[in-house]
Image (cartoon, grey):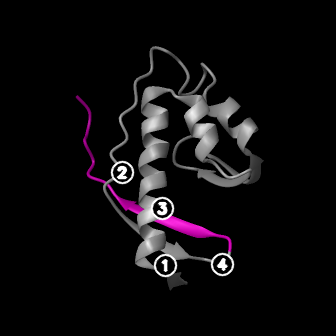
Amino acid sequence: MASVSADVAHILKEITFEWGECYDTKDWARLRAILAENLSIDYSDVTGEKWADIGKDEFVSMVSDEGFVGDPLVDTQHFIGASKFERLSDIEIRKRSKRKDMGTQ
């Protein structure tokens, strides 16, 4: 795995911020606008599921569903923390984040 350039890392940090903000504000049109046409998603820690190839419309439909983040009674606050980006291929980059465990209140 190779590292990414500072310019690419900056762009990825901007997109990561937008992604979290879209979830937290439930702005699904904004989320759809920043996503690639097809995604590889690993929600193993959240739902136990992984998708090797899911279209952005299907993905937005899933996360905006009232059974997931779209529930108006569910508030989210994404603490992204420091991020590291690794180039896996010409078209794939993995993001790793350092997050502080906020515990339960």
Which amino acid, by three-letter code, is at mark 4? Answer: Ser
Mark carried by residue 35:
none
Ranked by sequence position, the earlier of labels 4 and 1 is 1
Q: Position of residue 70 (x, y in %)?
A: 56, 23
Which residue carries the number 4 mark?
89
Ranked by sequence position, the earlier of labels 3 and 1 is 1
Q: Nearer the viewer, residue 31 or 102?
A: 31
Secondary structure at numbered mark 1: loop
Q: How far apart are the two marked residues, 2 and 3, measured between alpha carbons?
A: 12 Å
Local packing at callout 2 (Cα closer than 10 Å; few below 14, some 14-19, many 20+) is some
Queried whether the magenta region covers residue 14, the answer comes back as: no
Mark carried by residue 12:
3
Which residue carries the number 2 mark?
80
Query: Magenta span covers which residues?
Result: 91-105
Q: How far apart are the two marked residues, 2 and 4, measured between alpha carbons?
A: 24 Å
Q: Position of residue 36 (x, y in %)?
A: 68, 52
User: In the rendered structure, are the residues bearing label 2 and label 3 in contact, judged by CB atoms less than 8 Å apart?
Assistant: no
Mark carried by residue 4:
1
Q: How far apart are the two marked residues, 2 and 1, measured between alpha carbons?
A: 19 Å
User: In the rendered structure, are the residues bearing label 2 and label 1 in contact, judged by CB atoms less than 8 Å apart?
Assistant: no
Against 83, residue 58 (above or below) is: above
**Residue at (41%, 48%) from the top-left corner?**
17
Ranked by sequence position, the earlier of labels 2 and 3 is 3
User: In the rendered structure, are the residues bearing label 3 and label 1 in contact, judged by CB atoms less than 8 Å apart?
Assistant: yes
Ranked by sequence position, the earlier of labels 2 and 4 is 2
Q: Is residue 68 left or right of residue 5?
A: right
Ranked by sequence position, the earlier of labels 2 and 1 is 1
Mark in the foreground, 4 or 1: 1
Q: How far apart are the two marked residues, 3 and 1, measured between alpha carbons?
A: 10 Å
Secondary structure at numbered mark 2: loop
